[in-house]
Amino acid sequence: MEVAANCSLRVKRPLLDPRFEGYKLSLEPLPCYQLELDAAVAEVKLGDDQYTLEHMHAFGMYNYLHSDSWYQDSVYYVDILGRIMKLTVMLDTALGKPREVFRLPADLTVYDNRLCASIHFTSSTWVTLSDGTGRLYLIATGERGNNASEKWEIMFNEELGNPFIIIHSLSLLKDEEHSIATLLLRIEKEELDMKGSGFYVSLEWVTISKKNKDNKKYEIIKRDTLRGKSVPHYAAFEPDGNGLMIVSYKSFQFVHLGQDIEENKDENMSEKIKEPLYYWQQTEDDLTVTVRLPEDTAKEDIQVQFLPDHISIVLNGQLFLEGKLHSTVDHESSTWIIKENNSLEISLIKKNEGLTWPELIVADKQGEFIRDSAHCAAIAERLMHLTSEELNPNPDKEKPPCNAQELEECDIFFEESSSLCRFDGNTLKTTHVVNLGSNQYLFSVIVDPKEMPCFCLRHDVDALLWQPHSGKQDDMWEHIATFNALGYVQASKRDKKFFACAPNYSYAALCECLRRVFIYRQPTPMSTVLYNRKEGRHVGQVAKQQVASLETNDPILGFQATNERLFVLTTKNLFLIKINTEN
């Protein structure tokens, strides 16, 4: 059995700036342009049965504005009329209205349990589209950068089960066989395991192919499913289609549909039905073991043998329980009786009073320990000196206790840290694992549309941008850029909704649920002489922070960044903020 390789992310020290002094608030005005939409954005609010945190992450925080990474400064959204609207910016001062490029064939308003429509720009001439009802469309668009040749034509249209959103897609051409791989996300009801939320996350890898040029029909040739318990922060195919990378809080694994699922159901049911062989509890002085007896069991049918470190129970001539005790007992004082409720009760007297036993019989898992309330109270009393109802009862102490109210959101440690996993597309097994620990995931960005999307992680106070390279086995993730102190700064933004950066890393930006947009620029040379008074040294570069406030009270539904502009989508308006004026 192959074991996944444990890997680590290698930080490039030259890309870090240990002398970074922080962002300086700039009051320079940002040109902001507003477009009123002909029809409102097709926002789908969460239903009564979509109440978990995973539903909120996947659908409640969905980005309704889609950027075409193959043609910068082109953004798309879907309106309530089922139209896919496109805005391409050539000149900021002469903005045209968004124009319709495609209309969904079905009337979405008649569906009760639909999700938001989702779009992914697969290549420069292909788009994958979901209408939110469980139907997948493959669309040939022509060259989208040329209005004359752009024409959206459906090449594949099929119902694929429960509603989903598209996470990623990839266009492949091998030996004249064109195929498109899509990654679909669903949140499904868990029928058996009711622990936790009662839902699980499903990622379906669907490959659709056309065998040759003569055959015009595209067909599904492969469907594989991964299951997990949390919505992935990041999921993307490798450029050659041979693998998949996922960043998630809880791990995913491929599942085999059909017979294996039925077998798992039987195993789970048998585990749930199986009762403990015996129950036991303890005090500081003794232990009590209770065994449920078969009906009509007489005293003569029971044989219990006590030894200082061993116990043996025989019922009706058959060995019921035998093993070495965790510690020694006073075997001469130990007794057993039959209770009125047809159970056998065994009393064992501890030789070492006060010793707490973690188990009754060494390495035996057939019993269940029942905690005694008096015993729990005694343990709590012993630990009382370590706790206090006050946050800091003695502030003059050398090492005061931690004040949880001083922790930032990103400083909270989860029971399970996030991980980055690489799955092989052929074996469906995990080949590489990176434990991200406290490196909080922040956002993803497409720097080069022919490569995998980059992801940004917090490292200490900085935000580091990583570019996956599936072809480099020794250095699969490259540190390509750093946003100084951004990991620390973003933690203070409690109402942040979307996070992005320019593909050329010139700035990062985040927006709140309403109105405000924050821009953090990379350090640039100063035109005037500036000195650091504390250190008495010349400051050559300054990083600027800017704040834009949108003239609307509608919630922000979409957010996209290009090298020169920020696009912000609300229910009825599309805002364009000019960030970089240099061409």
Image (cartoon, rainbow, N blue to C red):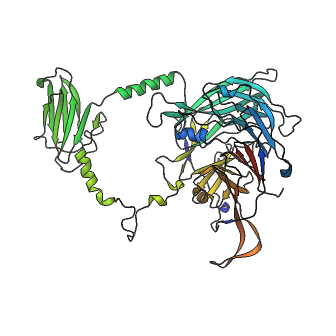
Rendered-image quadrant of the C terminus: bottom right
Residue nearest the viewer, comparing 482 with 316: 482
Q: Is residue 486 left or right of residue 328?
A: right
Q: Is residue 499 above or below residue 185?
A: below
Q: Is residue 260 above or below residue 35?
A: above
Residue nearest the viewer, comparing 35 with 453: 35
Q: Is residue 258 visible?
A: yes
Question: Horizontal and vertical percent for residue 541?
Answer: 72, 68
Q: Is residue 301 above or below residue 352?
A: above
Find residue 543 and report its image quarter: bottom right
Q: Is residue 197 left or right of residue 336?
A: right
Find residue 526 and report its image quarter: bottom right
Q: Residue at image x 64%, y 25%? A: 160
Residue nearest the viewer, comparing 342 with 267: 342
Question: Horizontal and vertical percent for residue 545?
Answer: 69, 62
Q: Residue at image x 13%, y 32%? A: 337
Find residue 517 and report its image quarter: bottom right
Q: Is residue 406 left or right of residue 471?
A: left
Q: Is residue 174 visible?
A: no
The image shows a total of numbered marks equal to 0
Residue nearest the viewer, comparing 175 with 256: 256
Question: Horizontal and vertical percent for residue 25?
Answer: 68, 65
Question: Horizontal and vertical percent for residue 12?
Answer: 65, 58
Q: In this view, which residue lies farthest toward the right?
A: 148
